[in-house]
Image (tube, helix red, strand yellow):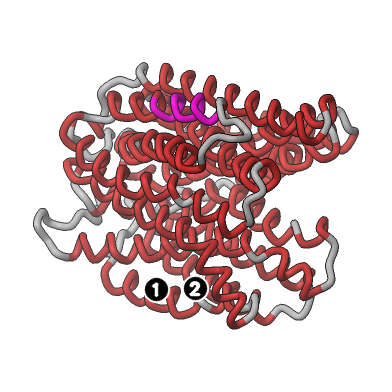
Amino acid sequence: MATTSVPAGSRQKWLVLLAIGVGSFMSALDGSVVNAVLPLIRSAFESSVAEIEWVVTVYLLVVSGLLLTFGRLGDLRGQKTVYLAGFGIFTVGSALCALAPSASALVGSRGLQALGAAMLFANSPAILTKTFPAGERGRALGLQATMTYLGLTVGPSFGGWLAGRFGWQAVFTINLPIGALALALSARTIPADPPPDRSERFDPAGAVTFLAGLVSLLLALNLGHALGWASPAVLALLGGAALFLMGFVAIERRVVQPMLDLSLFARRQFSAATATAFFNYICLYSVVFLLPFYLIQGRGLTPAQAGLLLTAQPLVMAVAAPLSGSFSDRIGSRLLSSLGMLILGIGLLLLASLGPATPLSEVALRLGVVGLGTGIFISPNTSALMGAAPRARQGIASGVLATARNVGMVTGVGIAGAILTTAQAQAGAEQGLTSGIRLAFLVAAGVAILGALISTTRGRAAADSGQQGLP
């Protein structure tokens, strides 16, 4: 069987981690930077809010819908091949974004950029899992998570500085030197990984039905709190999503070589890790969505002041993730993942008690508790999920993990947005803001506690036993 494992003690595996880390930093930086400068882009093109929102929406839809596809292609064609192609496409897409003459051209270029990003996201955990032995996997994935959180942390302030000094195009052109560096480093350091079975074929019917189903679901979640959950458009999208996803499952059960091997979910470690990752991102993006409303609309902070305060969460996550990942290499994933979700739930309960006069230092402290819980959770859980998949299914396991993350993000924003808008419609803008945020954080805390309970059900598997992927 082909392998990409690098000998223990080899310097090359750390160079691989550096290459993957630079890519993770770049993709996280790009996402947070673009969100921060949307008002400037809207003004530059004199576009409507609805039109300019597609700069973010199209990226999310394309990335989410293609993660499983590119994870599977990584298993069939080699993770390195797909990963390098993704870097090239992402970099070209970034250049086209900077050169876009109109909002519609920018949306199209963002779609191309998202195509490359999906190739990166779907294969980077698989590359690290194959490169590092099981006893170092949590540490490596934790360090990768740190690079992601650093990108999220510096993105808003760095993007604001870039856009203010050089124009909004600079937030895309910055990807060109970073992308070129990461592409060269990845091509040089990541070992070749020929697929173990060249006779396996791709499943186009499964790929198309999954793409249609997930895009329909994400659009419904994205539009639900704005149009109303009972609106004809949202109901039609939800109905279409249900039909396409049921069709996808039926296809995957019937074909000989499915895109998604459903037997992976029969492994308790894999299914528990997937479910808890989904719940974790529901909670995390409830915070991402709600706190700016509380800080800017409720407390009167400027966007810059709010952005600085919000960095408390990713900074704590960046410190906790590699420590927790390294610790999980010795004691396994179950305790740390469950503890992380429990601490996250406590942090959300603390946020639910925020009032109009809560000292900002306490707000930062409570955000730090949320960051601590997520930082403790993420690396052991990722290591457990990847370790529970066979080597020949590492790409699709990466795709499942990334899909759970993206669907969790949109679900969290959808739930929080629905609760907030409903509360404001019933109680008025000011009073509804306070009651809506409180209720939304209580709901998110319940989700975190449910995730902690599910996490305790996982059994010992590759991540805990030290084996490199069960056959």
Q: Amino acid at mark 2?
A: Gly
Residue 209 visible somewhere in the drawing: no
Where residue 100 sits: x, y (%)?
71, 78
Q: In the figure, 264 relative to 311: above or below?
A: above
Question: With respect to residue 287, does 446 lie above or below?
Answer: above
Quarter of the view holding residue 462: top left
Residue, disc 1: 183
Front one among 404 and 313: 313
Res 296 visible: yes
Q: Are marks 1 and 2 in contact (CB under 8 Å)?
A: yes
Amino acid type, mark 1: Leu
Question: Is residue 350 inside the magenta stretch?
Answer: yes
What's the residue at 23%, 30% (across, down)? 332
| Secondary element at image label 1 | helix
Residue 112 rendering spot, x and y as whole percentages: 63, 67
Residue at 59% x, 53% y: name it: 63
Instruction: Name the residue: 52% across, 74% down.
Output: 91
Q: Position of residue 182 (x, y in %)?
A: 38, 72
Quadrant into which the C terminus falls: top left
Give how far across and how far down residue 42 sits, in percent: 77, 67
In this figure, which residue is indicated by the disc labeled 2? 88
Tell which circle, 1 or 2, labels the residue nearer the N-terminal end: 2
Q: CA distance from mark 1 to mark 2?
A: 7 Å
Q: Write the start and end of the magenta stretch as one range.
A: 343-351
Position of 93 with respect to 460 (left or right) is: right
- For residue 106, above or below residue 273: below
Question: In this orientation, which residue lies closer to the viewer: 375 or 70?
Answer: 375
Q: Residues within 10 Å of mark 2 (few under 14, many from 20)?
A: some
Q: Mark 2: which secondary structure?
A: helix
Residue in the foreground of this view, choosing between 383 and 264: 383
145 is higher (above) or lower (below) than 282:
below
Q: Most prominent secondary structure in the magenta stretch?
A: helix
